[in-house]
Amino acid sequence: MNKRNKKNIIFKILFSTMALISFLILFLGNNYNNYYLLICNSDAISEEDKIYIKKYGDTLDGQVKIIDAKDIKDAAMMCQCLKNSFNNISDKIKAIQIFGTKDDVPAFEIGFEVKMGEDKIDRAYEDFVSDFFYSSFDSDFYRLKSRTAINTIFANKLDVSFVPRWQVSRLPLKKDEISKFIKKYFVYKDQIKALGNTNKIPVVSFSNPILLESPVVDDMGYFIREKIDKQYKYLNNRTYRLYGLLEGYNKVSKPVDGDFIKENLEKENKKQIMDLFINCHGEKDKFIKLVFKSDSLGDREMTSFIDRSNINSILKHNYYTLAAWSCLVAQGLDDQNIIYDILRYKCVDAIVATTIISNNGTNNRVDFEKKQDNNFYLFYYEFFKSLSNNNSRSESFFKAQKAYAESVIKNKDLDDLYQYHIVNILSYHHLGLV
């Protein structure tokens, strides 16, 4: 055995069998059928934050373990510590809840190197961060300790799992902001209770397709109206309103309730609590309106729809949840993106991406009861299906992510571009509380 291999093996042994470094700081609850692991960094939260994290833990139906990550330097080490402590009850783990940005509790570093065809590698986009591998103990975390490229995982057949086993949510806020969010969350839950029925919360969609195809296959508004509501009845008679792009070669299919403009977004936010869906182009600091002026990809106009400078003056009236099919809006899982801004104000829950979202295989017209393939709409089919069965948004996110991941892995030998779907799986996050 050469010295280098011997050194790696020794390091791996140390990594996988390290002492448990007193990182378990509090136990709550007495229901041993479900376990909730709440992770925070005691150096990055205030006393008020600690009080409200405990109050939040008291509301969960299960055994709650609050874990201090202050001495943990990377996400792989964090997960290995969790695995060392809780692998014997892994079948009972209901969720992992992370408090803080990735600078407070680390996320995994994913290299954007994606195989496209036989011998081409796409390196066109920046590396990104992901919490996905917190969702099971089935991976060799040593292999994920530093930046890990997606194609490397498959090319080298690394022991890495892409199928989640439990919910993972992160509340990516800073000191003193966490307690304020939990207080807000409690008020929101009380307002939901006062309604008497979650079916009274409207679903509001703002749809701006970005593919230049006919029919427009990435029109989320059409998908919710025609598939989720009319065909599958998963809205359970909830009110649905659609505001869509009404100009250009990528306009939505009618009927719609209005145009894709921020005035309509504020109008809806003034009415009441809503579940908001946005599909459009995105960047770290903004949601973008994209109009194709002709059938040429180069003939397009991009303008800001909402951005960090105005979003909280537009969406300032009532609480709302957000699901966004938009690239990059949660990039970094830090305090420098637009999702950080909205979570500090009226948004109580966000489903968003930390890098680009791939539209490969996207088709909003297939029958998902008969055909499940590498199609990102499968995620939202399963998400709405789970919501219709009265599951929470975080549990519905988990069920949808799991179904989508299982489909991608099952079909990967039939799809040369399957690694782009792995990007979707790793980059899509539930940000808020389980």
Image (cartoon, rainbow, N blue to C red):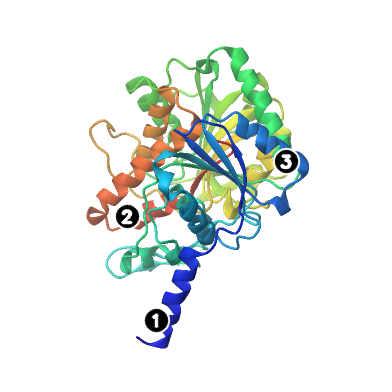
Q: Residue 297, how many percent across, how many down?
A: 44, 53
Residue at 42 percent across and 54 percent down: it is 423
Residue drawn at the location 37% of the way across and 33% of the way down: 382
Q: SS of the residue at dot 3?
A: helix
Q: Secondary structure at mark 1?
A: helix
Q: Mark 3 belongs to which amino acid? A: Asp
**Left of 209 or right of it: where is 173?**
right
Up the image or down, 243 lies above or below 356; here it is above
Q: Position of residue 233 (x, y in %)?
A: 37, 20
| In this view, 169 is above or below 274 | below
Q: Secondary structure at mark 2?
A: helix
Please identify the quadrant where the C terminus is shown.
top right
Residue at image mark 1: 5
| Camera-side residue of 434 and 128 | 434
**Residue type for callout 1:** Asn
Image coordinates of residue 90 in percent, x first then y, are 42, 45
Amino acid type at image mark 2: Tyr
Tell me the distance, in whole angstroms, between the alpha carbons under discs 3 and 1: 45 Å
Quadrant of the image containing the N terminus: bottom left
Quarter assignment of residue 38: top right
> What crowding class fits label 1: few (fewer than 14 Cα within 10 Å), some (14-19), or many (20 or more)?
few
Q: Which residue is labeled 3 in the image?
A: 49
Q: Are marks 2 and 3 in contact (CB under 8 Å)?
A: no
Give the mark toward the camera: 2 or 3. Answer: 3
> In which quarter of the view is residue 368 placed?
top left
N-terminal of the pair, mark 1 or mark 2, is 1
Disc on res. 418 = 2
